[in-house]
Image (tube, rainbow, N blue to C red):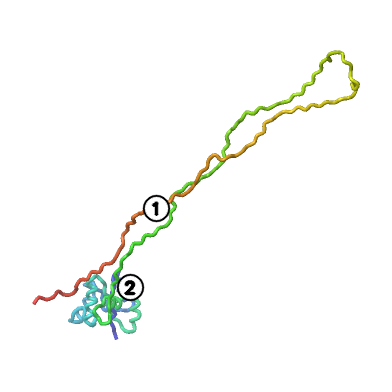
Amino acid sequence: MSQTLVALYDRLEGPEQIRRELETAGVARTDIRISGESEGAGAQTAATQEPRGFWEWLFGAPEEDVTYYREGVERGRTLVTVQAQEQDLDQIMTILERYNPIDVQGERAATATGRAGEEARIPVVEEELKVGKRPVQAGGVRVRSYVVERPAEEQVTLRDEKVQVERRPASGAAPAAGDAFQERSVEVTERHEEPVVEKTARVTEEVGIKKDVRERTETVKDKVRKTEVEVEPTGAPPKRR
């Protein structure tokens, strides 16, 4: 018993490729229909087997299904139908699904409106602008102290001592004292002065480092998005009476 498999594609690149895969799987070329093909053996055979319209002959399906697929083709989608035997259905379905067909049931359920207990919802989204702040390094100051040397001089008066030994004849004819023949020794020490350097440090200046904090107000401009909902009637215009 044969069945008709239907697959709807949003974009089908190279329809001949899927036809070749189906034929390789054993499907006759006359049992493969791809929308948009106005010529070829498949289309010509379909036109001669049944006097009914193409869509009704192709599906034998309820009118609402035929209408859905017809509207899909009119929007540029590609429709592929295959007449297959029951034992070949799994293999053919694998080939059709390899080309990413549209989830027809999910799409129809998502767009269905006006049915009892069902509601189609479209979220209305709007962005809000929130501005925060973070610290960013913008520069700074480094203060470094180091030591330099410069020549300095001061004048100081120094004293040097010099011992002089002088021999001269005695004046007069005074007699010698009683201890004149005792041994005697006299030492005289010479002294000299030399400069002694002493350094003292004193604070002549100081450098202060501090931060001056000020506040400013800045206007931040950006764009926020939101979705708008537009409702427009569809279907045939009302008839005039």
**Which quadrant of the rendered structure holds the N terminus?**
bottom left
Can you say whether 83 is above or below 123 in the image? below
Residue type for callout 1: Glu
The answer to whether residue 111 of the structure is visible from this angle is: yes
Residue occupying the point 23% across, 77% down: 68
Question: How many neighbours does mark 1 have within 10 angstroms: few (below 14), some (14-19), or many (20 or more)?
Answer: few
Location of residue 225 by image quarter: bottom left
The percent position of residue 223, horizontal first and vertical second, equals: 31, 60
The answer to whether residue 7 of the structure is visible from this angle is: no
> Which residue in the structure is indicated by mark 1?
215
Question: How many neighbours does mark 2 have within 10 angstroms: few (below 14), some (14-19), or many (20 or more)?
Answer: some
Left or right placement of residue 157 versus residue 113 in this view: right
The percent position of residue 28, horizontal first and vertical second, equals: 29, 78
| SS category of the residue bearing label 2 | loop
Q: Which of marks 2 and 1 is in front?
A: 1
Can you say whether 180 is above or below 120 in the image? above
- As drawn, the label of residue 100 is 2
Location of residue 41 by image quarter: bottom left
Outermost residue, bottom direction?
A: 1
Q: Distance between the residues labelled 2 and 1?
A: 59 Å
Residue occupying the point 30% across, 77% down: 106
Q: Mark 2 vs mark 1: which is more N-terminal?
A: 2
| SS category of the residue bearing label 1 | loop
Q: Choose between 69 and 152: the one closer to the eye.
A: 152
Location of residue 156 by image quarter: top right
